[in-house]
Amino acid sequence: MGRGGPTEGGDVRRETELADRIGILRPLRIRDFRLLWTGMTVSMVGDGIYTVAVAWQAYEIWNRPSALAAVGVAWSIPQVVLLLVAGVLSDRLDRRHLMIAGDLVRMVAIGAIGALSLAGALTLPRLVALVVVYGAGQAVFGPAFSSIVPTIVPDDLRVQANSLAQFVRPLTLALIGPVLGGFLIAWLGLGAAFLVDAGTFVFSAAMILAMRTRAVARGEFERPSAWRDLVDGLAFVRRRTWLWAAMVAGTVSLLFTWGPWDVLLPYVVKNDLGGSASDLGVVYGAGGFGAVVVALSMGQRGRLPRRPITVLYLAWAVGMLLLAGFGLAVALWQAMAVAFAAEACLTMLMVIWVTLIQRLVPQEVLGRVSSLDWLLATAGVPASFALVAPAASTFGVDATLIGAGVLGAAITLAFMLVPGALGPERDPVVRERLLNQVQSSQT
């Protein structure tokens, strides 16, 4: 005991010094944030496994883009239907409980897919029905997760916390998870890969249950009804052009790009490049590596760019344009290079966007704003999935990817020119507030 004390104290000091030197690690000194991201890290590895497994499963059932497109529509419809309700609930209830419920719903859905796949009884209608349930669980989880982080992490660590999120997300969801998923499918089969994913949701729910964070105190902003909550949240966004312009830009640009990215990239790897499930995982992994590089860089920097919204739109447009690269790729390494660059740009976009929302949106409406953000981002997704198969059939897979990338980039840049879209970086008062918070994050 006598010798153990100093050693343990030295270990703690060394860990603290390491966190101080590596900016992206600083938020992990906060217990609840550490628990949250331990669970999320494991869960997102499972999500990465799912990304490869569901694509390969859909094409195993029916080797046509419309098969995976149907799965995409099934996932996205619950987002559109449930997200606003989930946002209202996340501002009124204990956000941990909503997140645990979302995890358990997804565990049941993915577990059922795995069991049916192992039994050889998984048909496309059954897969689609279970993905609807999975999407509902995700719709419940998302707004609660987005709005719980600011209750855990102080403002001076927000950039680092969001950079860590954008580091862990691609590292797990786009790098470790897909690569692991490809190998699990090759070694154990599709059913086993889905069951591993289901288990990760149980672990995530256990970590959230261990958190001490409770519901936000209502206090002076007690509201009479959920309907009033919803109306107030919509009014808050409508009065801020920079918010609604970016959200609507997301709706339109993702209408052109989400379906082609999710449906046609696996098709290209499988059919045009002659790849396997492992090769698809490696392409996704290359994108994850690009995202990790950017997230580490921004986390170490610890502050936003001087003109954050301008940088956001430019990175967004380049990321959309790079979708065209998949239509031009004739070798696996080229698809990997495109994925690397595209995910790097989109990660920069996400770190900036999430940090701006957390800094400029009051805590009492953050859940509703986050849910509206995700709702508008996914509002065009069902149509994107529905249109991608006929577009690929009419124009060809490569032409559809190229056209989608060009249109997505052009639309994004057009919304940057909307009067007021760059408001926070042009308003002296708001800019000074952001600069002060940047300075506090450096001290």
Image (cartoon, rainbow, N blue to C red):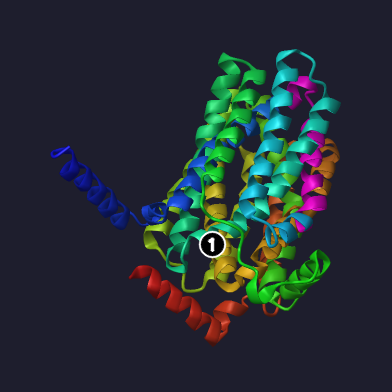
Seen from the viewer's position, the closer of residues 321 and 436 is: 436
Quadrant showing the N terminus = top left
Magenta-tinted stretch: 57-84
Q: Main secondary structure of the magenta part?
A: helix
Residue under label 1 = 151
- 323 to 430, vertically: above or below: above
Q: Quadrant of residue 215?
A: bottom right
Seen from the viewer's position, the closer of residues 181 and 222 is: 222
Any magenta on residue 277?
Answer: no
Quadrant showing the C terminus = bottom left
Q: Which residue does the image show at 84% across and 35% down from the upper left? A: 393
Q: Is residue 96 visible?
A: yes
Toward the front, the furthest residue is 1
Q: Quadrant of residue 313?
A: bottom right
**Looking at the picture, how far across and down is residue 242, in whole percent?**
66, 73
Toward the bottom, the furthest residue is 428
Any magenta on residue 62?
Answer: yes
The amino acid sitting under disc 1 is: Thr
- 397 to 24, vertically: above or below: above
- 323 to 131, vertically: above or below: below
Q: Which residue does the image show at 39% across and 69% down from the upper left? A: 441
**Looking at the picture, how far across and down is residue 155, in whole percent?**
47, 68
Left or right for 239, reference 351: right
Seen from the viewer's position, the closer of residues 402 and 81 is: 81
Toward the left, the furthest residue is 3
**Looking at the picture, how far across and down is residue 398, in whole percent?**
72, 39
Task: Classify 10 Å Cα crowding around label 1: few (below 14), some (14-19), many (20 and above).
Answer: some
